[in-house]
Image (cartoon, coloured by chain):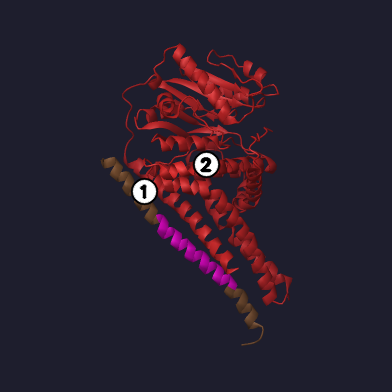
């Protein structure tokens, strides 16, 4: 590994970590919103039945 | 930096969850609406309408608003509330000749005490008028529009549809900015109200948490009078959300109408925009005084409490989120330049470009969504350059709003609660 590869890897890692974090948060938010939306819809359906 | 990163991720998670939930629920509601044909209203109701239009220095818009409203055929009264205007507002009002118009004047020293106070004053006029004419309060609808508000032609049909359903005490119309736009700032306000807020309101409907806006709201007189009394508005700078909270705590339901809109003028100047938003944020902070009552309230559903909590916590999330963005961005550049031993401005420039473009993602998504909404509703689409700039402005709106947040917190801490009126240009 040449000495100049390390800093480049550094930049790549920062960028990748940022993107992975972002992606992870997005997936987590998507799953949570699916649960919340399902909860809301079920409540609405229940209210309709009553 | 690790702590800042974690805080930022939590805030990002909350924002994303909120946006995605709104998106999913609004999609579900619209799909469900398509499946069921609309119920026909068999019984034609003869509602009596009172329109309250608060005015402070509205000479530029009030005549047009009244003229447009008078075109509609309805029984009722239109009440422009002159709250101490110093310009030609009154003479502009008098130029519109219609027997339904009755000017309600506030007098010194009570003028310009806030929109809530002006509405309470006009509300007492409405109650008195109802008593004088022995009106059936069940049949009285009170509408509130801004001095620049214009309703779409189908408003009566939509109102009748909503109030044919006994469970609703109030309704909020979709808000649309008047096009064509003079600049992209106006287009971004339209995207925010017509598209983003529309989805949020539809989703709130599922959770029985629709929020009233200051413009385009209607309510039945009888339940408001019975539950909130003769002075229903408080003195929060966000009078509409304070009114919403009071209604929710007394189990009064609000419907959201997306098939009829209220048009209003968007602001053209950045400074006016910052000032207007700082007033809204401060009003949001004012509503925190209701937290103990909300927590104790047993009639509110947990979903409603969750929606209220999100709304009230927004100024704090935005403040901390913005600070974290600035801090993390600064630290990232600092670290990268340290790793790179500041050997090339090209690399830094590349990194800046990467972050900049990556940040445009949400702006792009919201712009596409907005343009689709406009086309679907046969509304005027912003011009080519406004569409391009829209992506940037939506993505970087938080920088502009950061100033509003700081001003709002500063004013709140200093105890300055004077109503900062947005001037018409």
- The residue closer to the viewer here, B402 or B406, is B406
Local SS, label 2? helix
Q: Main secondary structure of the magenta part?
A: helix
Quarter occupied by the C terminus of chain A = top left
**Chain holding disc 1:** A
Q: Quick check: is A21 in the magenta stretch?
A: yes
Instruction: Please tell me whether mark 2 or mark 1 is closer to you in this view.
Output: 2
Q: Where does residue B152 sit, x and y in percent of width and height? A: 50, 29
* Residue that carries the numbered disc 2 in the rendered image: B289
- Find residue B79 and report its image quarter: top right
Q: Quick check: is A20 in the magenta stretch?
A: yes
Contact, CB < 8 Å: mark 2 with mark 1? no
Residue neighbourhood size for the residue with mark 1, other residues' Cα within 10 Å, grouped as few (<14), some (14–19), many (≥20): many
Gap between marks 2 and 1, in whole Å?
A: 27 Å
Q: Colour of chain B?
A: red
Q: Where does residue B319 sit, x and y in percent of width and height? A: 60, 53
- Find residue B247 and report its image quarter: top left
Residue at x 39% of width, y 53% of height: A36
Q: Colour of chain A?
A: brown
Residue situated furthest left in the rendering: A49
Residue extent of the magenta highlight: A14-33
**Chain holding disc 2:** B
* Residue that carries the numbered disc 1 in the rendered image: A40
């Amino acid at each position: 590994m040449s000495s100049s590869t390390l800093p480049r890897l550094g930049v790549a890692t920062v960028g990748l970590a940022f993107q992975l974090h972002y992606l992870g948060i997005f997936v987590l938010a998507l799953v949570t919103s699916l649960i919340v939306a399902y909860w809301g819809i079920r409540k609405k359906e229940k209210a309709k039945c009553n | 930096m690790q702590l800042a990163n974690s805080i930022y991720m939590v805030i990002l998670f909350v924002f994303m969850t909120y946006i995605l939930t709104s998106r999913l629920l609004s999609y579900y509601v619209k799909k469900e609406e398509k499946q069921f044909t609309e119920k026909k209203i068999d019984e034609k109701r003869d509602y009596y309408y009172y329109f309250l239009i608060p005015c402070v220095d509205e000479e530029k818009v009030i005549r047009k608003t009244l003229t447009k409203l008078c075109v509609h055929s309805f029984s009722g009264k239109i009440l422009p509330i002159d709250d101490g205007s110093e310009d030609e507002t009154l003479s502009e009002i008098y130029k519109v000749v219609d027997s339904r118009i009755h000017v309600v004047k506030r007098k010194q020293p009570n003028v310009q005490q806030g929109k809530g106070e002006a509405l309470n004053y006009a509300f007492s006029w409405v109650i008195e008028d109802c008593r004088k004419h022995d009106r059936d309060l069940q049949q009285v609808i009170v509408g509130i529009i801004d001095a620049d508000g214009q309703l779409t032609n189908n408003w009566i049909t939509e109102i009748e549809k909503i109030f044919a359903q006994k469970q609703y005490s109030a309704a909020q119309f979709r808000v649309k900015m008047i096009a064509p736009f003079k600049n992209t700032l106006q287009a971004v306000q339209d995207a925010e109200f017509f598209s983003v807020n529309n989805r949020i309101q539809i989703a709130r409907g599922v959770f029985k948490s629709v929020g009233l806006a200051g413009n385009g709201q209607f309510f039945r007189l009888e339940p408001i009078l019975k539950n909130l009394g003769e002075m229903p508005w408080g003195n929060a700078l966000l009078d509409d959300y304070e009114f919403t909270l009071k209604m929710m705590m007394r189990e009064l339901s609000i419907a959201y109408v997306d098939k009829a809109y209220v048009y209003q003028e968007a602001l053209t100047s950045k400074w006016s925009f910052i000032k207007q938003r700082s007033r809204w944020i401060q009003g949001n902070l004012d509503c925190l005084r209701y937290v103990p009552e909300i927590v104790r309230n047993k009639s509110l559903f947990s979903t409603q409490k969750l929606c209220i909590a999100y709304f009230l916590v927004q100024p704090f999330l935005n403040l901390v989120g913005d600070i974290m963005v600035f801090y993390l961005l600064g630290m990232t550049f600092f670290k990268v330049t340290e790793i790179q031993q500041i050997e090339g401005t090209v690399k830094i420039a590349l990194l800046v470009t990467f972050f900049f473009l990556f940040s445009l993602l949400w702006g792009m998504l919201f712009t596409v969504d907005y343009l689709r909404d406009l086309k679907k509703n046969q509304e005027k689409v912003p011009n080519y350059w406004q569409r391009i700039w829209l992506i940037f402005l939506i993505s970087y709106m938080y920088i502009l709003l950061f100033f509003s947040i700081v001003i709002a917190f500063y004013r709140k801490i200093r105890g300055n609660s004077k109503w900062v009126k947005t001037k018409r240009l």
